[in-house]
Image (cartoon, grey):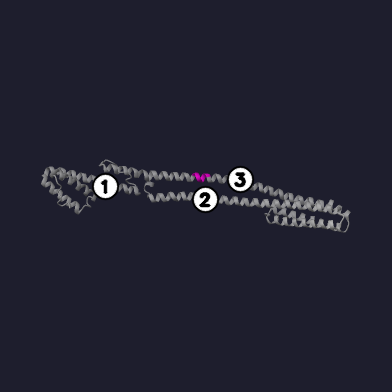
């Protein structure tokens, strides 16, 4: 694995690390958005249930208003008072119809729809009994009206209230289920978001450590090696040799520089040994030839090697004759 990473370019490593972190961030964002969407759906369901509870409670209130108004009709002696009570009863029926329409608009199919149908059927029976009661009151049949009020209207009202109570129970149960699901969903979201954040932190730390160990460390080691080369420590080993990335390319270039310095030192040492054998004139003539070769074909040894060699030869000329020989050097 380490050898594989060493053969990957630094640019590819940086892009890959950035892409991994970006993908983790996108995954975290998408998951958070999905959870927020689910929570919004739960909130909408709770709002619908709250609306249904409010409408059902209002319907129960209107039924009680109607029953109270019916009782007052029997004991009101004046026609004006009876007309006023009849108007209030009609208003209560209109309010019931409006609340039921609002409730029915938010009803879900299935069990809740069946409960709504039960309320509608109970309301229709209750209205039929109410119409008969109003007719009896208007015709002065008070005894029959009293019997209907305490009998049919009462029983139909109780049945209607029972249907409304069933719908209320259903709404409460659904609200509790939605709240429970939302709480569980929130806890799950917190867990997964925490795990994704921990994963992102781990990936970032791993990428950082990999960058330090794979890039910064070798470059620092190479800098130290180049300082030792500048101090003419030819025994230093060039770190990073054999790598396939940019660090390996730098190591290869430094190795060539080192090899050229070694070659220049070896040639200078050979020329110094020859100087003792050939004498001053013969040595200076050979130096001129070598300088001319370095000037005309410095590529053979490398320009750096030729420069080093020429400086060494110039130093040896000064040691032998006191002034450098410039023939063939310019």
User: Is 167 left or right of 211, judged from the image as shown?
Assistant: right
Expressed as whole percent of the image width and height from the top left, the position of residue 47 reads 65, 51
Where 251 falls versus 109 (above or below)? above
Q: Secondary structure at mark 1?
A: helix
Image quadrant of residue 116?
bottom right
Magenta segment, principal secondary structure? helix
Marks 2 and 3, how far apart at CA: 20 Å
> Which residues are the magenta region?
194-198
User: Is 42 left or right of 67, judged from the image as shown?
Assistant: left
Q: Which residue does the image show at 45% across and 51% down from the upper left?
A: 19
Q: Which residue does the image show at 70% across and 49% down from the upper left?
A: 170
Which numbered tag is attached to residue 211? none
User: Is 222 left or right of 45, judged from the image as shown?
Assistant: left
Which numbered tag is attached to residue 257? 1
Expressed as whole percent of the image width and height from the top left, the position of residue 319 reads 15, 43
Q: Is residue 196 magenta?
A: yes
Which numbered tag is attached to residue 183? 3
Q: Which residue does the image show at 55% across and 51% down from the upper left?
A: 33
Mark 3 vs 1, N-terminal side: 3
Image quadrant of residue 96?
bottom right
Residue 1, can we see it?
Answer: no
Expressed as whole percent of the image width and height from the top left, the position of residue 283 reads 13, 46
- Label 1 Cα neighbours within 10 Å, binned few <14 / some 14-19 / many ≥20: some
Mark 2 vs 3, N-terminal side: 2
Residue 149, can we see it?
Answer: yes
Expressed as whole percent of the image width and height from the top left, the position of residue 10 reads 38, 49
Which numbered tag is attached to residue 29? 2
Question: Are the two marked residues, 2 and 1, in contact with CB atoms closer than 8 angstroms?
Answer: no
Marks 3 and 1, how far apart at CA: 68 Å
Mark 2 vs 1, N-terminal side: 2
Image quadrant of residue 192?
top right
267 or 295: nearer the eye?
295
């Amino acid at each position: 694995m380490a050898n594989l990473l060493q053969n990957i370019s630094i640019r590819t490593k940086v892009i890959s690390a950035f892409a991994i972190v970006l993908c983790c961030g996108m995954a975290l964002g998408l998951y958070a958005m999905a959870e927020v969407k689910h929570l919004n759906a739960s909130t909408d369901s709770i709002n619908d249930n709250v609306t249904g509870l409010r409408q059902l409670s209002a319907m129960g209130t209107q039924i009680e208003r109607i029953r109270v108004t019916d009782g007052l009709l029997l004991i009101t002696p004046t026609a004006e008072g009876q007309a006023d009570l009849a108007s209030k009863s009609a208003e209560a029926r209109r309010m019931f119809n409006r609340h039921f329409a609002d409730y029915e608009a938010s009803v879900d199919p299935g069990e809740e729809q069946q409960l709504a149908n039960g309320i509608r059927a109970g309301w229709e029976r209750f209205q039929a009994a109410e119409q008969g009661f109003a007719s009896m009151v208007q015709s002065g049949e008070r005894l029959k009206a009293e019997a209907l009020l305490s009998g049919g209207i009462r029983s139909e009202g109780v049945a209607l209230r029972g249907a409304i109570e069933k719908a209320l129970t259903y709404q409460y149960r659904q609200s509790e289920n939605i709240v429970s699901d939302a709480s569980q969903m929130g806890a799950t979201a917190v867990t997964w978001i925490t795990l994704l954040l921990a994963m992102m932190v781990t990936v970032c730390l791993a990428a950082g450590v990999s960058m330090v160990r794979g890039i910064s460390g070798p470059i620092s080691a190479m800098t130290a090696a180049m300082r030792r080369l500048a101090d003419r420590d030819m025994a230093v080993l060039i770190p990073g040799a054999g790598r396939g990335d940019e660090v390996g390319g730098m190591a290869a270039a430094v190795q060539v520089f080192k090899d050229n310095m070694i070659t220049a030192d070896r040639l200078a040492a050979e020329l110094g040994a020859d100087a003792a054998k050939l004498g001053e004139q013969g040595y200076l003539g050979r130096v001129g030839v070598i300088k001319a070769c370095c000037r005309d074909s410095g590529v053979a040894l490398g320009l750096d090697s030729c420069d080093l060699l020429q400086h060494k030869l110039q130093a040896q000329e000064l040691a032998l004759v006191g002034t450098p020989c410039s023939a063939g050097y310019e």
